[in-house]
């Protein structure tokens, strides 16, 4: 059970910590020039130490907490580090966010780099310039960040991550069900030695793929073989390395399920072994990234409606603006599609 979020740090806390007046602290936070260098250093040090995040309801455009009319609305999108390094998947989500923000005549601000490796003391600096209380968090961000932002008055929409607390919206895909359908497809083709190449075991996406994969094997009466589950980086080279590991094992698989990025590397490794997809080994991916239809042969994959997820996230943020306290928070689950191309 998640720990309750601590009370938000306020200007009063910083003033008490530094021994300065609330007015001086406020001037530093707002970037005013009429503050001595010593006081500024003292306040900024306290901001980092206490984890202060400006309350957007008080600071939004320095005058209002309401969203404003069309053309003056601002939506912020904070991208986790995996979004930057996994461009092929998240590009569609970002495109959907940008398109829908434009359709609603909203200004869109982007922030980067809030991941598990980010110290909590860095959160205030990263969100201070967003200038809006309505934030879309894209990718797997630390739950502690969600709690801290929520406690400080931000209205949140999570994309590709289930909410760790109430009072936020989310847009997700049922990855476990998608993995189940992909594995079941391979079972129906007659395969019984089906390998799974997944990312780091602690990653929620890897856990979802494993859950669906195990369920499909169990329903088909196929014993789970741990030697056919290989962990690798969620990149093409990770898929390439994983195939090399599988081929050194006691029983080479007849089919492989993984995500699209790793499937591209896996396909190359299979070809280097003198084998062909799907004649010698079936290969199914997940995500339907841009290049999946252009591999040789085209990759069978589970298509995730990435742009739709981005558009839905903006609509939820707009609904939060328009409905205020009447807004009902929810998690929207989008549908996936199995695209059978070659395997």
Image (tube, rainbow, N blue to C red):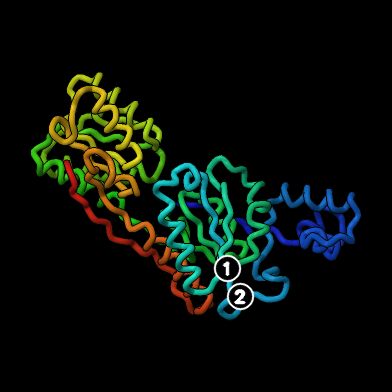
Image point 30% across, 49% down: which residue?
288
Q: Is residue 91 above or below residue 269?
A: below
Is there any visible trace of residue 339 in the rendered image? yes
Does residue 116 sit above or below 146 in this rendering? above
Q: Secondary structure at mark 1?
A: strand
On the picture, is 55 further left or further right than 275? right
Residue 319 drawn at (x, y percent)? 47, 75
Left or right of residue 162: residue 66: right
Against 38, residue 56 (above or below) is below
Ranked by sequence position, the earlier of labels 2 and 1 is 2
Question: Residue at (33%, 45%) from the top-left corner?
Answer: 291
Q: Are marks 2 and 1 in contact (CB under 8 Å)?
A: yes
Q: Residues within 10 Å of mark 2 (few under 14, many from 20)?
A: few
Q: CA distance from mark 2 to mark 1?
A: 7 Å
Question: Regarding mark 2 in the picture, which secondary structure is present there?
Answer: loop
Please name the residue shown 79% across and 60% down the image: 31
Pick the front one: 236 or 37? 236
Which residue is labeled 2 in the image?
Answer: 72
Q: Is residue 322 above or below residue 299?
A: below
Viewer-proximal residue among 131 and 148: 131
Q: Nearer the viewer, residue 69 or 226?
A: 69
| Residue under pointer 1 | 107
x, y percentage for residue 137? Answer: 50, 57
Residue 333: x and y, percent?
Answer: 33, 61
Asked where in the image residue 23 lies, by quadrant, the reply is bottom right
């Amino acid at each position: 059970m998640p720990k309750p979020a601590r009370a938000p740090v306020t200007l009063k806390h910083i003033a008490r910590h530094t021994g300065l007046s609330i007015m001086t602290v406020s001037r530093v936070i707002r970037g005013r020039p009429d503050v001595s260098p010593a006081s500024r250093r003292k306040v900024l040090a306290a901001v980092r130490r206490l984890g202060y995040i400006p309350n957007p309801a008080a600071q939004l455009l320095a005058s209002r907490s309401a969203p404003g009319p069309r053309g003056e609305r601002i939506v912020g999108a904070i991208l986790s580090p995996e979004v930057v390094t996994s461009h092929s998947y998240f590009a569609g989500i970002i495109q959907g966010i940008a398109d829908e923000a434009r359709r609603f005549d909203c200004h869109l601000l982007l922030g980067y780099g809030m991941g598990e490796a980010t110290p909590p003391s860095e959160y205030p600096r990263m969100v201070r310039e967003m200038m809006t209380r309505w934030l879309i968090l894209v990718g797997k961000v630390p739950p502690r960040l969600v709690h801290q932002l929520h406690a400080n008055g931000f209205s949140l929409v999570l994309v590709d991550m289930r909410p760790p607390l109430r009072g936020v919206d989310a847009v997700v895909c049922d990855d476990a069900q998608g993995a189940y359908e992909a594995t079941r497809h391979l079972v129906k083709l007659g395969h019984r030695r089906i390998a799974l190449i997944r990312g780091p075991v602690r990653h929620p996406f890897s856990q979802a793929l494993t859950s669906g994969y195990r369920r499909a094997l169990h329903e088909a009466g196929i014993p789970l073989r741990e030697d056919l589950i290989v962990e690798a980086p969620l990149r093409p080279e990770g898929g390439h390395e994983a195939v090399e590991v599988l081929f050194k094992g006691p029983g080479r698989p007849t089919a492989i399920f993984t995500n699209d990025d790793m499937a591209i590397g896996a396909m190359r490794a299979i070809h280097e072994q003198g084998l062909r997809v799907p004649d010698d080994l079936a290969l199914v991916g997940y995500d339907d990234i841009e290049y999946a239809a252009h591999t040789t042969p085209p990759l069978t994959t589970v298509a995730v409606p990435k742009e739709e997820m981005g558009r839905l996230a903006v609509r939820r943020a707009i609904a939060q603006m328009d409905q205020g306290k009447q807004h009902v928070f929810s998690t929207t689950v989008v549908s996936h599609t199995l695209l059978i191309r070659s395997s």
